Amino acid sequence: MQKSDIYEIAFKVLGLYLVVVVIGQLREVLMYAAVLLQSRNNVSEGGLDHVPLFLISVFSFLITLLFTGALIFRTKKLVRVVSKKEDSDNITNVITDKVSIYQIASTIIGFILIAVTIPHFGIQLKSYVQLLQSGSNLNDQISDSLLISGIKIIVGILALIYSNAIARFLSKEQR
């Protein structure tokens, strides 16, 4: 098994997990579409504009759908971007290099962190916009949650970009 095969398996499994997330988000998009259509007919909503909420739901759905599609249908391209050429040249039964194992783990963790956080970020952004529109006091918990989700996405991206440096750091023997 090659190192790139492990990446490929992990990406496809993560993509299959995201299919379930996308189905849940589709329900939310359809719900907001119905609310938007209904609010166009009934003006007695108190001036609440549902268009931004609908757009956030659609945007979150589309990003998650594109990420899911890339993980499932463009796995080979993602593996080529993430791994080096020698990762697919060396055929081994077991990867014994600690740096390689840490690099694979860092890459997988980065993708999982991004994949799990994007839908949550969309939901929090929608809640934040709802509070802004309704004129309610902004809930610090929602603001903090939105900030934490953004930080998680950034950490996931950094884990992908610097997976090799993280692997080298973690594989050093402790003195």
Image (spheres, rainbow, N blue to C red):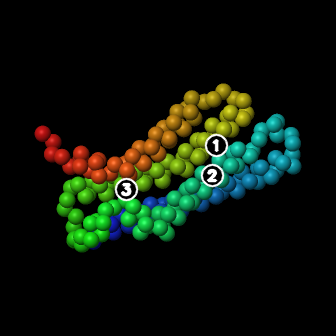
Horizontal and vertical percent for residue 102?
27, 53
Residue 31: x percent and y percent?
A: 71, 53
Q: Specify the quadrant of the image occupied by residue 29.
A: bottom right
Is 25 situated left or right of 52 in this image?
Answer: left
Q: Disc 3 and disc 1: Cα gap in Å?
A: 28 Å
Q: Amino acid at mark 2?
A: Phe
On-image quarter of the N terminus: bottom left
Circle 1 crowding by C-alpha within 10 Å: few under 14, some 14–19, many from 20: many
Q: How many marks?
A: 3
Tag 1 or tag 3, which sits nearer the N-term?
3
| Residue type, mark 3 in image | Ile
Q: Are marks 2 and 1 in contact (CB under 8 Å)?
A: no
**Is the Cβ of the residue at disc 3 closer than 8 Å to that at disc 1?**
no
Q: Residue at x 46, y 50 (%)?
A: 114
Residue in view at x 52 percent, y 49 percent: 118
Q: Which residue is mark 2?
A: 59
Q: Judging from the image, what secondary structure is the residue with disc 1 in? A: helix
- Mark 2 burial class by Cα count in 10 Å: few <14, some 14-19, many 20+: some
Q: Quadrant of residue 24 in the image?
A: bottom right
Q: Please name the residue that numbered disc 1 is placed on.
A: 126
User: x, y percentage for residue 23?
Assistant: 59, 60
Name which residue type carries label 1. Lys
Where does label 3 land, which residue? Answer: 108
Left or right: where 25 falls relative to 172: right
